[in-house]
Image (spheres, rainbow, N blue to C red):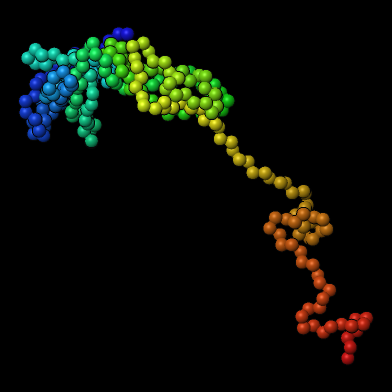
Amino acid sequence: MSLDQTVLKATPRVKHGKGPARQLRMKGLIPAVVYGPFSPPMGLAVDPVAVKTAINTPHKFNTVITLEIEGGAKKTVLFKDWQTDPVERNVIHADFQEIQLDKPVRVDVPLVMVGRAAGAAEGGILQIARRVITVEALPKDIPHKIDVDVSSLKIAESLHISDVTAPAGVRFIYATNFTIAVVGIPEKEEVAAVVAAAPGAEGAAAAGAPGAPAAAGAVPATKVSDKPAEGAPEKKGGGKEKK
């Protein structure tokens, strides 16, 4: 595996604090620091445009950089962290981690899904649960991405990090066997059953036709009672009123 290695020039920075940092930025530079287990932290001044150029490789933030420090010193580093201006989003501070080419380092590498999931052809939806993995490798073996083949995934099936084979010289670092991708079950639309009324049924129900279905919202017909209304004189014998 090829090693993306670029050169970045830097100047030692003696003064620290907001004032000196502001003066550096007025000169088109930004404050930076390089730290690691091999030497004490060192303050530097670097060109932010040169920093972007240095990591403009397929490895991006995992590009191995040779810091050429004014005075003759050199350090092999990785671009570790940065701070940006909250308004203009320009880089205003950079951190570099000192490394050695013969010692493994831990970095985050993107997970890239390749292929079309079999379940997607059946209406399932491929859902990505994780897009990065921490790896441990020698600087020359750091991959710029990890391809994850999802073509075998069927509906309701998932892929875990343990299902992925690490490239040669690379070790995956994880505490739990996390899910990378899953093909979700497609959601079925609930269709309400519509019962069509027979032609003329509504009118028949309204007219009280025998056996006709009641129209939606119609008030049921009231049965006429033979019992006389309350307070009315009771009729006897042939319907003639007794005097």
Residue at the right extreme of this rendering: 238
- Estimate the x, y position of residue 2 in percent, counting from the top left: 30, 8
Q: Quadrant of the C terminus?
A: bottom right
Corner quadrant of residue 164: top left
Closest to the observer: 104 or 44?
104
Corner quadrant of residue 211: bottom right
Q: Quadrant of the N terminus?
A: top left
Total numbered labels placed on residues in the image: 0
- Estimate the x, y position of residue 119 in percent, counting from the top left: 55, 24
Residue at (21, 30) in percent of width and height: 83
Q: Is residue 65 visible in the rendered structure shown here?
A: no
- Estimate the x, y position of residue 27 in percent, counting from the top left: 10, 26
The vertical placement of 72 against 162, above or below, is above
Q: Is residue 15 visible in the rendered structure shown here?
A: yes
Residue at (72, 46) in percent of width and height: 196
Corner quadrant of residue 47: top left
Closest to the observer: 112 or 89?
112
The vertical placement of 90 against 68, above or below, is below
Residue at (55, 31) in percent of width and height: 185
Q: Is residue 146 left or right of residue 182?
A: left
Q: Is residue 44 left or right of residue 105?
A: left
Closest to the observer: 176 or 43?
176
- Estimate the x, y position of residue 72 in percent, counting from the top left: 9, 12
